Amino acid sequence: MTAFSDLEKKSDEELRELLCAKQDEIRRLRFKAKENQLSDVSKIKKIKKEIAQIQTLLTRSKDSQEQ
């Protein structure tokens, strides 16, 4: 899991790429969970939190550019 302070240092483009990667990862984890192949289901929650943090930073950046 990436620390929030590390995410803040990334550019918008890097954040968008990371967001796509995390969304793909969560999709794969959900499929594994449905098939009972995922041993650590808490990983889904961690990835969702990371996605929310990335989206928050992207929104902050967008808002600051508009002002």
Image (tube, rainbow, N blue to C red):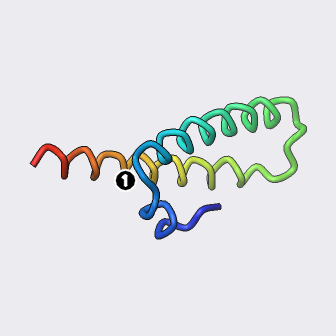
- In percent of width and height, residue 60 lies at 27, 52
| Residue ranking furthest to the left | 67
Q: In the rendered image, which residue does mark 1 sit on?
A: 57
Residue at position x 47%, y 40% in the image: 16
Residue at position x 30%, y 46% in the image: 59
Number of numbered discs on residues: 1
- In percent of width and height, residue 50 lies at 54, 53
- In percent of width and height, residue 27 lies at 68, 31
- In percent of width and height, residue 15 lies at 48, 47
Given residues 41 and 55, the one toward you in this image is 55
Element under disc 1: helix
Q: Amino acid at mark 1?
A: Leu
Is 23 above or below relative to 4? above
Residue at position x 25%, y 44% in the image: 62
User: Quarter-wise, where is residue 17 in the image?
Assistant: top right
Is 20 above or below relative to 41? above
Given residues 26 and 36, the one toward you in this image is 26
On the rendered structure, is 15 left or right of 30? Answer: left
User: Quarter-wise, where is residue 29 in the image?
Assistant: top right
Is 2 above or below relative to 18? below
